[in-house]
Amino acid sequence: MNLNDLTLGQIKELQAIFSNTASISSEKPCPFEVGEKYLIRTVTFTLTGQVKSKVGDFLVLEQA
């Protein structure tokens, strides 16, 4: 398949497929809610605090 030979319809179809996949994979479910207080236990630490924000795969805690 030569990419230069694609029709406009085929390009739009590919765009729809890849844009739907990207939006689904970027929205990971997260059990933590901003404003709630949690006790978080890791291998080496135990933290308590209130979730201020979620940045990517990280939680920002305040009053920790």
Image (cartoon, helix red, strand yellow):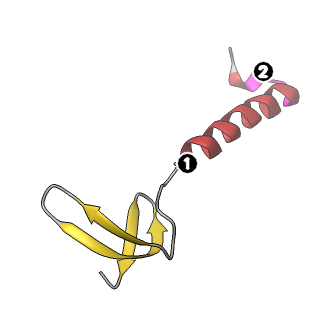
Q: Amino acid at mark 1?
A: Ser
Q: Position of residue 33 (x, y in %)?
A: 51, 66
**Relative image position of residue 48 (x, y in whole percent):** 29, 74
Q: Position of residue 6 (x, y in %)?
A: 79, 23
Q: Quadrant of residue 4?
A: top right
Q: Which residues are magenta?
A: 4-8
Is residue 6 found left or right of 63 in the rendered image?
A: right
Look at 69% across and 18% down and name the residue there: 2
Quadrant including the N terminus: top right
Horizontally, residue 22 falls left or right of residue 4, namely left
- Residue occupied by mark 1: 26
Counting residues from the start of the chain, the first of labels 1 and 2 encountered is 2
Q: Amino acid at mark 2?
A: Asp
Q: Residue furthest left?
A: 44
Report the side of 8 relative to 15 (left or right): right
Query: Which SS type dominates the magenta stretch?
Result: helix
Image quadrant occupied by the C terminus: bottom left
- Residue drawn at point x = 45 percent, y = 60 percent: 56
Q: Is residue 9 above or below residue 19?
A: above
Residue at x-position 64% and y-position 46%: 23
Residue at x 78% of width, y 21% of height: 5
Residue sitting nearer the eye, 60 or 3: 60
> Residue at label 2?
5
Compared with 15, 28 (above or below) is below
Look at the picture and state if 3 lies above or below 54: above
Element on which disc 1 rests: helix
